[in-house]
Image (spheres, rainbow, N blue to C red):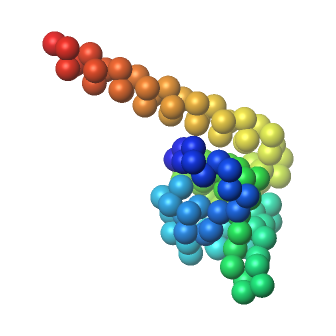
Amino acid sequence: MALNPHKELKLYYSISEVAEMFDVTETLLRYWEKEFPTIAPRKSGRNIRQYTKEDIEEIRVVHNLVKVRGMKLAAARQALKTNKEGSQQTTEVMMRLQAIKEELMSIKKELDGLV
């Protein structure tokens, strides 16, 4: 789920790029946009969505609540309403733990190759 380091310089991401980042469908992103007002990508003249890094962070929090933690949409909305900062911090911790897990798995694989 990490952003491509070469894409960090981009100001806007397409809906297909964002869907790929989170391994979800474009339809689901459009649905979340209706369900969570904080997800509000800019729309170009032809109604093409353009996501900023801030939009992606909002999606990351919703993704964590709904897909990773398994919350229903109403519960996720309530969690964001009552404790948005806590939800964002939890998402950041989950991302860090995932990165640590991947690093440890990489180290284990290297060590297994030495035996």
Specify the farthest residue to the right.
82
Between residues 54 and 97, which one lies in front from this camera angle?
Answer: 54
Q: Is residue 66 above or below residue 26?
A: above
What residue is rendered at 70% in x and 62% in y? 12
- What is the quadrant of residue 97 in the picture? top right
- What is the quadrant of residue 40 in the picture? bottom right
| Spot occupied by residue 25 in the image (x, y as percentages of width and height) | 51, 69
| Spot occupied by residue 103 in the image (x, y as percentages of width and height) | 43, 26
- Please state, as top left, top right, bottom left or bottom right, where the C terminus lies in the image: top left
Q: Is residue 16 above or below residue 22?
A: below
| Spot occupied by residue 99 in the image (x, y as percentages of width and height) | 51, 31
Between residues 109 and 9, which one lies in front from this camera angle?
Answer: 9
Task: Tell whether 43 sits left or right of 60.
Answer: right
- What is the quadrant of residue 2 in the picture? top right
Task: Tell whether 111 sits left or right of 30.
Answer: left
What residue is rendered at 75% in x and 63% in y? 39
| Residue 89 visible, this orientation | yes
Specify the farthest residue to the bottom.
46
| Spot occupied by residue 42 in the image (x, y as percentages of width and height) | 78, 70
What residue is rendered at 68% in x and 56% in y? 10
Q: Is residue 9 above or below residue 101?
A: below
| Residue 71 visible, this orientation | no
Specify the farthest residue to the left.
115
Q: Is residue 54 above or below residue 102?
A: below
What residue is rendered at 36% in x and 26% in y? 105
